[in-house]
Image (tube, rainbow, N blue to C red):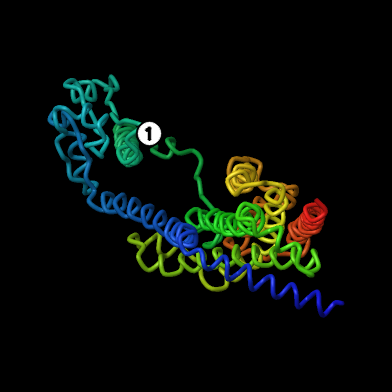
Amino acid sequence: MNADLFRNMGVVLVKELIDGLRDRRTLLRLMIPAVLMGPLLLLAISGLISSLEERADKREVMVAGIDHAPTLRNYLERQTYTIKTAPPDYEVRLRASTLLEPVLVIGPQFEQDLLAADRPVVELVSDSSNQRASAGLGTLQRLLAGFNQERATLNLALRGVSVELLQPVEINERDLASTQARATRITAMIPMFIIMAVLYGALTAALDSTAGERERGSLEPLLMNPVQHLALVIGKWCAVVILGMTVALISSLSFIPAQWFIQSDSLQAMFQFGPSEMFAFLLLQVPLAAGLGAVLMALAIRSKTFKEAQAGSGLVITLVGLAPMISMLNPGGDASWHLWVPGLAQNTLMMLVLKGESLSLVKVLPGVLVGLLLVVSCLVYVARSMRLAVAR
């Protein structure tokens, strides 16, 4: 009996894999996003960071009215910054995002007010919707803060007052994060894309092997064969899990060569994702692929058409896909209940891998138990639904 069960499961598994691989158009729709979306986003971010670093290396500031402030000009030039004159229509160009640098605006009374100790006012003009211009505000703010400190130091020194009064407390910064933990600011995108790869890889296979076959009229004849319903269900489920994990594997592999094309040297040094991280990620996805595949089959088995099953499973895909957002939006850090939520648990564990922290059984076990519970309950439901279909 057991030998027949496993043999029938193998036959069904091979049949489902062949059917899944035969639909090349669907496979291309899955593979292309799985392979390209994450790396393309990574390259886009690296291009943005590279352009910001390049602009920082040029050490240029855009000023309107610099002729009114020779003292400030002298300070900026001593900081090895090149002063560029802002165009007359800088406000219009900032709003239109054609000007990518903030503008320092100096009034005509700057030098006179500075000499009279009347605190001249300058403006930092930018547009918060113009992200590249907003990114340059920090540089101008630091330069003006340095200018203020230098002027205050000179004024105190001329009056015979110790300049140490300006800094009564000495501040030393100490960052506790390791290099790998700091790198997660960049690599944090990888878990999300791999989770989505598992979802969409399992989605098409689960719906096609249940609702798809019912719509084509091949499910009922298949159920009439002398094959145990349990073998039929488990064989289909194994095919769903394998296809979901295959798409996840391809998505993981795509990030390794993508690192070679990162334009920013600092980003390339921080981005640490190699074979060991990839292998750990795939192991962590197995409970998600297994549990979610069973859930999708259970949702689709009662649907009469593929489109109906697709609409019903959309909510599950959305909830599981957006679950990792909870940890990003939670200011209190990761909670213990995160490890019991499909999708969120895998994201939490993968982030620990990226930070270089060890995974204990206590952290991994909740996700495995939830996946196992989903598999058993949903596959029993699918097998029962198939028996009812035959009885009708």
> Which residue occupies the extreme bottom position in the image?
3
Q: Is residue 227 above or below residue 37?
A: below
Nearer to me, 169 or 139: 139
The percent coordinates of residue 147 (x first, y second) are 29, 37
Please indicate whether residue 105 sits to the left or right of residue 337 in the image: left
Answer with the quarter of the image where residue 213 lies: bottom right
Residue at the (25%, 39%) spot, across then down: 100
Q: Residue at 21%, 35% (x, y): give it.
A: 72
In screen coordinates, is 281 left or right of 139? right
Q: Is residue 59 left or right of residue 236?
A: left
The spot of residue 29 in percent (x, y) is 46, 57
Q: What element carries label 1?
A: loop
Quarter of the image with the N terminus is bottom right
Taking the view exactly as shown, the residue that stands out farthest to the right is: 1
Residue at which label 1 appears:
161
Q: Can residue 326 be seen in this view?
A: no
Between 370 and 208, the one lying in front of the other is 208
Q: Is residue 172 visible?
A: yes
10 Å crowding of disc 1: few (<14), some (14-19), many (20+): few
The residue at the point 62 percent across, 52 percent down is: 215
| Residue 286 in picture, x, y percent from top left | 67, 64
Q: Quadrant of residue 358?
A: bottom right
- Residue 78 x %, y %: 21, 46
Name the image quarter holding residue 357: bottom right
Along the viewing direction, whichever of 111 and 156 lies nearer the viewer: 111
Q: Which of 355 and 39 is in front in this view?
A: 39
In this rendering, position of residue 158 left or right of residue 387 = left
Q: Disc 1 marks which amino acid?
A: Val
